[in-house]
Image (cartoon, rainbow, N blue to C red):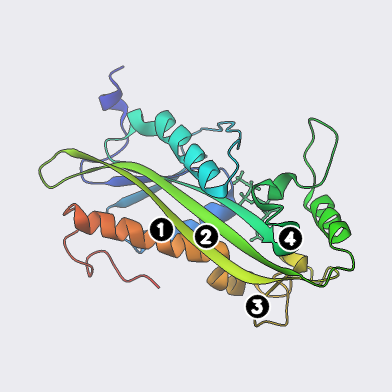
Amino acid sequence: MNPQHSRPDRPLSINVVLATCNTDKVRELQPMLDKVSPLLRVWSLNDLSLRPEIEETEPTLEGNARLKAEAVFSLVESRFSWLIVLADDTGLEVDYLEGAPGVRSARFAPVPEGSSPTYEENVTHLMKLMSGCIKRTARFRTIIAMKGRVPTSEGKAASIEETAEGRIDGSITSERIGKGGFGYDPVFMPKGMNLTFAQISMEEKNRISHRALAVAEAAGRIRDILVRYGISSTETETGTLP
Ligand code: ITT
């Protein structure tokens, strides 16, 4: 079948493909992208029935986010005329551990080959390495890489390659506090707060977190791209972002 005939997009829609199957991430991203422009149609990998195994082999968050964006772009570009793929990578960077676990945040605790550590095991490993240590500063950092193809006002195709970043500084507590959140939340206390990420509501976390900041920057970049290429002519048309 001619791939043109199976394309699910309309001529004037820009398809935003989120390079994730994680429904929590999709729930967080969708409303912010919906505010950018009515021309955007947001798809997750689940919506496209894709479950690619992309190995995160790069030594940096930026490298891994780009690698994911490129891999997913290659997978889906024949389905859409105009598209922007968004891929994210997040890491916890602890100063005492010279930036570790960083890109290895999901795979930090040593476990038998072929298996992955649980959140619980990763936190226990971190606590062990930091036992008795005074310097406890750390930060969460999220990078969102974007790779896309959008129409110019002359009807040509322009390639998009950008990254957005969000970070939140804080410290690692000496024991787990709080029951909410996931991952390293029970031991991460944002600077200026007396509560860990596991003690605040999901709404509050989604307002201040590394991921929320990166998503807001990515949404702003998409808005700028739409204006730059004359796809949406004014900032009013593309909505107001927080
Ligand atoms: P993907 O399949 O979407 O890549 P992932 O688990 O690798 O899922 P991330 O790159 O977002 O997800 O995060 C890597 C690890 O960092 C994750 O497994 C958690 O342990 C930790 N992490 C990320 N965001 C966090 C948050 O908001 N709070 C606590 N820990 C977080």
Residue at image mark 4: 184
The quadrant of the rendering that contains the C terminus is: bottom left
Q: Residue at x 40, y 47 (%)?
A: 146
**Marked residue nearer the N-terminal end (4 or 1):** 4
Residue at image mark 2: 28
Q: Residue at x 28, y 19 (%)?
A: 2
Q: Amino acid at mark 1?
A: Ala
Along the line of sight, the residue nearer the viewer: 208 or 22: 208
Give the spatial CA distance, label 2 vs label 1. Answer: 13 Å
Q: Secondary structure at mark 4?
A: loop
Residue at image mark 3: 191
Q: Are marks 4 and 1 in contact (CB under 8 Å)?
A: no
Along the line of sight, the residue nearer the viewer: 81 or 230: 230
Question: How far across and how far down the image is residue 202, in percent?
Answer: 63, 69
**Marked residue nearer the N-terminal end (3 or 1):** 3
Give the spatial CA distance, label 3 vs label 1. Answer: 24 Å
**Displayed quadrant of residue 159:** top left
Question: How far across and how far down the image is residue 135, in percent?
Answer: 77, 71
Q: Secondary structure at mark 3?
A: loop
- Badge 1, how many Cα within 10 Å: few under 14, some, many 20+? many
Residue 37 visible somewhere in the drawing = no
Q: Residue at x 55, y 42 (%)?
A: 64
